[in-house]
Amino acid sequence: MVQNSKIIVTGAAGFIGSYMVGYLNRRGYNNIIIVDDFSDLEKKSNYNSKRIADFVERDRFIEWVYHEPFRIDLVFHLGARTDTTEFDYSVHEKWNVEYSKNIWAYCTEKNVPLIYASSAATYGNGELGYKDDHDIVGQLKPLNPYGVSKNEFDKWALEQDKQPPFWAGLKFFNVYGPNEYHKGRMASVMFHSYNQVKETGKVKLFRSHNPQYKDGEQLRDFIHVDDVAAIMYWMMAEVKRQTSNVAHESENGLTTHHSPLASGIYNVGTGKARTFKDLVTAIFSSLNLKPQIEFIDTPEDIREKYQYFTEADMNKLRAAGYDTKFLSLEDGVSSYVKDFLLPHKYY
C-alpha cells in the first residue's frame, strides 16, 4: 500500500476493533487511523501500545474524513453500541444505523471499500436458521434493540443502488479473546466464566428449561477473535488483489478468470456449535483444575427469549475462497487463558 494511504478502524478502543489494529500492526501496517470515543480511560490499554497514524473522536470523524488529503484504502467499521440490555432504541439507531449510513455515504462517494460489523443477534431465536442468505434478511426478527438496529442497517445496505466498490457486513457470532477486560457484563461468557473460576473455584451455568437440552448443553458458535481478524484481513487482501488484477487486465486487454469476492452479508463463526459445558471444561483444563459446575435457573425475564442453539452456516465464506482452519474451542480457550488472562496481558 502506498505511503500516503491509510486504513480506518472505527471502534478501535473496543474489543474487536483494538484486536484488529494489533493484527494489522503485526503484519506491517502502521498507517492506521483509529476512531472511537476515547474518553473511557478503561479502554486505553487496548490501544496505547499500538502503532497508529492518528486518533479521531467518533463525534467529529464524519466531518473530519471528508477534509483529509490522503487516500483511504479501506474502512473497517467496527464501532457500535453493543449493549444488548440497552432498550432505548434511539441510542442504537443513532450509532448503529445513522452513523453507519454516513460512513457508507463517504465510502460510496470516495470509492473506498467498507467492511462493517453486523451481528448474529440479527437472527433472533433462529426460526429461519443461521444462513447468511440475503433473501431472509427482511424476514428476521431480532430479540433486542441492538439486534434490530444491526438488521435495519443490513436491510438498508442491501437496498442501496449506490454502493462502495466493495462492502461486506459481517455477522459475528460468539466472539471471545483478548482485549475485553473493559466490557463488564457485556464481556464474553468465556471471560465471565474464567473470573468465576478464579474467584470461587466453580462456574455457574444456566439450567436448561427446554426438555430437548440437558443442563449445560445449550449450544453456541464460539469463535476466537483471532479468527475474526484473520477473516477481515483476508477480505482486505482479496479486495486489493481484485483491484490490482482489474487494473492490470484493463492495461493489457486481458479478461479475468477468477471469481471475485462478492459484496454482501457474511457469517463469521466457526460453523461448529459447542456446549457451554465444553467451554467451561476447557477453562478448567487450561488452569489444570477439575471442572466444578453449578446450575442455576435462567432468570424468568429472559427465559422466553433464551437461545438454546446458534451455529453459523459458513458455506458462503468458504465458497468465496476462505480456506483457513478455525481455532478449536480447546486451543482458543487455552491460548486466551495462558497467554492473556493469567498474566493480564493485552493483544
Image (cartoon, rainbow, N blue to C red):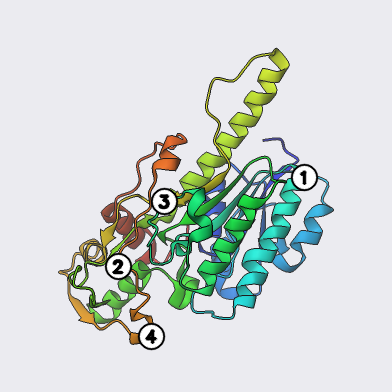
Residue 74: percent from left, percent from top? 66, 45
Indicate the secondary structure of the residue bearing disc 4. Answer: helix
Disc 3 to disc 1, C-alpha distance: 32 Å
First-in-chain label (3 vs 4): 3
Residue of label 1: 110
Quick one: SS at disc 1?
helix
Nearer the observer, 123 or 106: 123
Quadrant including the N terminus: top right
* Label 3 element class: loop
Classed neighbour count for the residue bearing mark 3: other residues with Cα under 10 Å, few (<14), some (14–19), many (≥20): many
The residue lying at 45 percent from left, 34 percent from top is: 321
According to the picture, the residue beneath numbered tag 4 turns out to be: 301
Q: Is residue 25 left or right of residue 196?
A: right
Could you tell me residue 108's position as x and y percent?
73, 47
Q: Which-is-in-front pick, marks 1 and 2?
A: 2
Residue 47 is situated, as x and y percent measured from the top left of the image, at: 58, 61
Numbered tag placed on residue 308 in the rendering: 2
Image mark for residue 131: 3
Amino acid at the residue labelled 3: Lys
Q: Does residue 319 appear left or right of residue 257 in this picture?
A: left
Q: CA distance from mark 1 to mark 2?
A: 43 Å
